[in-house]
Image (tube, rainbow, N blue to C red):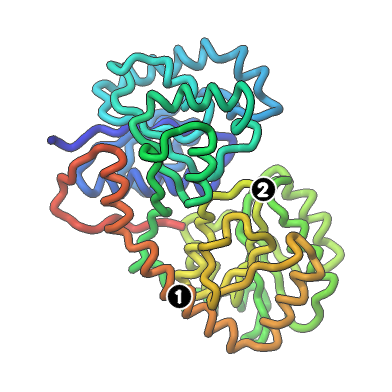
Amino acid sequence: MSASRIVSIQTTNERGGAEYANVDLLDALVARGHEAVLLTNFPDLVAGTSVRVRKVDLGPKLARRTVARVVLGAPLVLWRIARALREERPVGTLLLHFKKEQLLCSLLPRRLTGEIVWAEWGPVPPPMRRGPARLLYALAARRAHAVIAISAGTRDTVIETGVPAEKVHVIPNLVDVEEVKPDPASRAELRAQWGAGEQTLVVGCISRFQRRKRNDVVIDAMADLAGDVLLVIAGEGDQEAVLRERAAQYGDRIRFAPNVRGHVEAFLSACDVLVFAPSPTEGEPRVIVMAQLVGVPVIATDPEGALGLIPPDGGTIVSPSHDPHALALVLAAYRDDRARCLREGQAARRATLESHAPERTLHAVERALGLSRQATSSYLPRING
């Protein structure tokens, strides 16, 4: 079999973990001899990679607040998808990531789509697990050759909707584990910029600034956290102004940093712990994997997305969930036992090096996509955070 041509459709509202993870996966597949093109409304997602890109705007993602617009615009969107796929023929594998494209592409003929594979980066939303939406999802999934689920929890929700279990493959995020490591020089440089001494407990938080992410909990924990502690929050999103206003009362104890894409290791290396405040539906949070590879223990404010990913001896899941006071107590324990940061960080790195070996991940992806290996190189390009 010759190298297959992969067309990935991923139009989105924002640049987040799933979007970048998909680009990194496509880039790695290109390095292994496959051809890949990304159809997206954010062409800059592929910057610094070998992935070819075509700009396509398919309107908003399918969500409760957009369902009427999506339904009314479906014929036009379907026409745009069909036109884009005609221009990209022949399509060997069509890789789809979001519900609107998954549902609509099931209506297109195989001569346009080739083999359809779905990538589920998080649990199927609860509204799609019941009623007519569940039926539509299950019917559309009949056209899918395979479904790639980012975690066991995600797999279970896909099967719950009626997709046959044999179609669903659990494959973790692709990360270049040999390249992601602590960066002592960046640690010293960034901590100096932030005004943090070596005894300062620097708490990092990398997140989308949106309502579903509980960044408010991380900020509010500072009210109960005394001593030499600095919180640095990195990201972007429509809730940034709200979060900055919430944090204003803490002065220079809380700093905001821009999106860390491309230098996530440097940012994480400057932190002593990372706080993860999940939304109600998380797959395998990439930021947890990256932090653990850098040797930084992760503190999750809820088990969603963290359970099974944070090793028992390499971090903490806070209880009660999303409780600022409980989070403050956990952070205070790390503040008072700095050796614990190092000990748990090392344990987390060891566990992640084993669970996310890239060759294993790429072989699993190629099997799910129905691809055969063509390149002589056995490794993958640099994975950006």
Asked if residue 29 shows in the view, the reply is: yes
Amino acid, disc 1: Pro
Residue closest to the eye, 239 or 124: 124
The residue sitting at 70% across, 69% down in the picture is 231
In the rendered structure, the answer to whether residue 301 lies left or right of residue 100 reads: right
Badge 1 is on which residue?
182
Q: How many marks?
A: 2
Image coordinates for residue 327, horizontal then vertical, percent: 74, 70
Q: Which of the 4 image quarters holds residue 247?
A: bottom right
Q: Which of the 4 image quarters holds residue 349?
A: bottom left
Assess disc 1: are there few (<14), some (14-19) or many (≥20) residues with their C-alpha within 10 Å of its C-alpha: many
In the rendered structure, the answer to whether residue 369 lies left or right of residue 72 reads: left
Q: Is residue 170 above or below residue 357?
A: above
The residue sitting at 54% across, 58% down in the picture is 260
In the rendered structure, the answer to whether residue 259 lies left or right of residue 277 reads: left
Which structural element holds mark 2?
A: loop
| Residue 280 tag number | 2
The mark closer to the camera, 2 or 1, is 2
Image coordinates for residue 251, horizontal then vertical, percent: 82, 68
Image coordinates for residue 317, horizontal then vertical, percent: 64, 67
Image coordinates for residue 219, horizontal then vertical, percent: 77, 63
Amino acid, disc 2: Pro
Q: CA distance from mark 2 to mark 1?
A: 30 Å
Which structural element holds mark 1?
A: loop
